[in-house]
Amino acid sequence: MMNLWNDGEAEKLVADYAKKGVSRDLALRVYTTRLLGGEPRLVLHGGGNTSCKTKATDLVGDEWDVLCVKGSGWDMGVIEPQGLPAVKLGALLKARSLKKLPDEDMVALQRVNLIDPSSPNPSVETLLHAFLPHKFVDHTHSTAVLAIVDQDDSEALSKKVFGNKMGFVPYIMPGFDLAKAAADVFDANPDVEGLILDKHGIFTFGDDAKQAYDRMIHYVTVAEDFIASHGKPRTEKADLPARLAKPADIAPMLRGAVAVARGEGRFDRMISDFRTSDAIVDFINSARIADYAGRGVSTPDLSIRIKTGPMALPAPDADKIGDYKSVIGQHVEQFAKDYRAYFETNDALDDVKRTMLDQMPRLTLVPGLGMFGHGRTLKDAKIASDVGEMWIEAVRGAEAVGDFRPLSKADLFPLEYWSLEQAKLASNKPKPLTGQVVLVTGGAGAIGAATAKLFADNGAHAVVVDLDAARAAEAAKRAGNSSIGIGADITDPAQMRAAFDRAVAIYGGLDILVSNAGAAWEGRIGELDDATLRKSFELNFFAHQSAAQNAVRIMLEQGTGGVLLFNTSKQAINPGPKFGAYGVPKAATLFLSRQYALDYGAHGIRSNAVNADRIRSGLLTDAMIASRSGARGVSEKEYMSGNLLGQEVTAEDVAQAFLHHALAERTTADVTTVDGGNIAAALR
């Protein structure tokens, strides 16, 4: 592993932070923490921790010896000084004399001794850092080190690899007991330069930041070199079909299968992130991949990301793709059954009250294709995929030098169901549309952009589709929540299909369609040329049908229902003069929405329409407003607020109506009017 320490960069960071009142010790602690955190083979997404012992002044000017240690929720790769809260060292050292210290009391001890009470909770391994006498302490979950310790004979192998320069600590769950045990191992041989924690990772330490970092890189490299020179090849490969299905063929099936059923047609959906590479495929094509997956996670910290380990599927045969949905279902059902047994067996061993987490996998391995990470957000799904890549590297290394034998699931359970982790989960409340994907056509226009933004604010990932790709991308950026923009001419079936395929490629599927795009042409209906009317029908009717067909195709594969929402305009009910080219296809689209409600209600797919009027947008431009108000003989202001409420209706008002229909779980074949009140356009 490359040593990335650079004297110039280190000193520049020290100088920059000195201007902000940050000490040299803390600045260098930040520097090496970032170096470690930027390497996924060492730490991932909040994993690992570092510390330094220094001095700090409290609010009344008293100076204290402190431990600055990584705070909960901070990512080492982007850490700032405030991510290393200072804890009074004396109180931490006194704790070593205690015979026991429950986790909740340990957290309280650390919090009550913070120099700044607004700081995040210090790492759960704070006491381990404190009990070691060195000024700088580093901890990572190196995949190479895990390959050495994920063995039945891990202690003997560690001694062979690292010699007497590294102490060996048997597996103990992180917390007070581990801190005492690690300190005892060090005290028995104070000449060691670090500690190997069985089934867990590696600690190194030093008198300065560079020494601790250098030692980490050195001993990780020792492990890597041992694997490279002593590894035995694993060549047994599974038989693959002559013609493999594509990831897009199975993604919606898989996404639907891992959705958590809440009863009565309700689901907590997940996003799926597909990941592949030659290295990934080479490993998961192993004939033993299901065995490896069943053994568990390479380090117990990963349990909060991928539960008890991955789920392995058989390779999908393109010629038998119709059968693969049931194959996925059977494997998910077995994974859930095994997880329930794991929970019930281990939960019964004590009187602690626990809430079982959902039983769905967070990482799925598909031979021949790659892997899918699953999560309630795209970020979580990508984290699961990142973890999957490092799991593969650790397992590959472990199998090369021995036999991958990670922590038993019985020992894993207390960490996955740790009271501290349970408290975090309990405070994490999803938004109404968390886990769902919405595709909005005409997404760069006023109504489309407002709808994408509102849905994203409520937890959905938005796919913004518009003829103008740049404006679609900008609308997606404004929407936020990892939304994407796609340029497409939706009157072209191939481009429409490609937009939906992109949604599947990025998120794994689709749950909500807002078929919103439209444009208007003026003229008396009896004098319109056929080309104009046909052009309007292509955009204002057939494009809606094409969008709905693509959405239903995906929704049926998922099997978790879905929502079709159509912008039909008041013209579908209350036609205006010289607007027949727009109103006639819109009337057809209104009945199209009802036909979908009728034909697909049994599949849990709801279909509703929004009947909006006089919304400033790309369709109702300033020129159009002038023309329409003139046709009615009123001022522009009177035209825009010519309703029962006497108020102009905005794009955001229409977006609220779409959101209402997305959340109204027992409403279908409905039309919601958003026009401020127009009796002539009211239904029934």
Image (tube, rainbow, N blue to C red):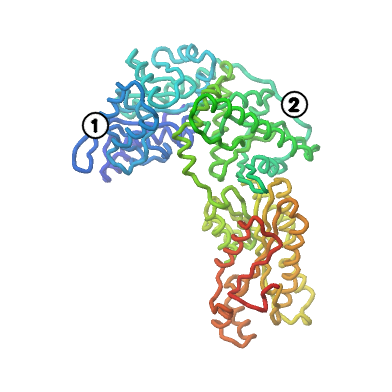
Quadrant for residue 67, please give it.
top left
Judge whether 610 appears above or below 285 on screen: below
**Circle number at residue 65:** 1
Left or right of 61? Residue 399 is right
Q: Position of residue 193 (x, y in %)?
A: 36, 19
Three-letter amino acid code at the position of disc 1: Asp
**Circle number at residue 166:** none
Quadrant for residue 406, please give it.
top right
Mark 2 lies on residue: 239
Three-letter amino acid code at the position of disc 2: Asp
Q: Position of residue 415 (x, y in %)?
A: 49, 29
Q: Residues within 10 Å of mark 2 (few under 14, many from 20)?
A: few
Q: Residue furthest bottom?
A: 633
Left or right of 407? Residue 52 is left
Provide the secondary structure element on which disc 1 rests: strand
Spatial CA span between label 1 and label 2 = 62 Å
Left or right of 492? Residue 503 is left
Q: Position of residue 412 (x, y in %)?
A: 52, 26
Q: What residue is at 42 percent from the left and 18 percent from the top?
A: 169
Left or right of 521? Residue 393 is left
Labels 1, 2: front one: 1
Is residue 211 visible from the viewing direction of this image?
yes
Q: Counting residues from the N terminus, which is met first, the one under dot 1 or under dot 2?
A: 1
Quadrant for residue 446, please give it.
bottom right
Q: What residue is at 45 percent from the left and 36 percent from the top?
A: 46
Task: State the residue in front, 635 or 496.
Answer: 635
Image quadrant occupied by the C terminus: bottom right
Judge whether 233 appears above or below 539 on screen: above
